[in-house]
Amino acid sequence: MSQGRAPAGIAAAPHLAPGTVRNHLAAITGKLKARSRADVIRIARTNSWI
């Protein structure tokens, strides 16, 4: 995600369906109370998760 890849691109590596990746990204965004994927990346970097 931090590399700017779309859900379909993220899904290809671990052989997941794009819909599964979208659902997980939405859950992560909601749990972090982020407004966008960019916010998720910023929060992850701030907390040294990536």
Image: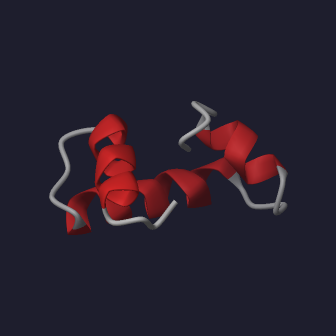
Q: How many marks?
A: 0
Picture quarter with the N terminus: top right
Please report the residue visible at 44 percent of the width from the left and 55 percent of the height from the top: 25
Relative side of 16 to 31, left or right: right
Please report the residue visible at 73 percent of the width from the left and 38 percent of the height from the top: 9
Quarter occupied by residue 31: bottom left
What colouring method underlies this structural image?
secondary structure
Relative side of 11 to 31, left or right: right
Relative side of 8 to 37, left or right: right
Please report the residue visible at 15 percent of the width from the left and 58 percent of the height from the top: 33
Q: Position of residue 47 (x, y in %)?
A: 33, 65
Q: Nearer the viewer, residue 24 or 32?
A: 32
Above or below residue 23? Residue 36 is above
Q: Nearer the viewer, residue 47 or 1?
A: 47
Q: Position of residue 34 (x, y in %)?
A: 20, 50
Quarter occupied by residue 42: top left
Q: Nearer the viewer, residue 16 or 33?
A: 33
Please report the residue visible at 52 percent of the width from the left and 59 percent of the height from the top: 50
Q: Nearer the viewer, residue 42 or 14?
A: 42
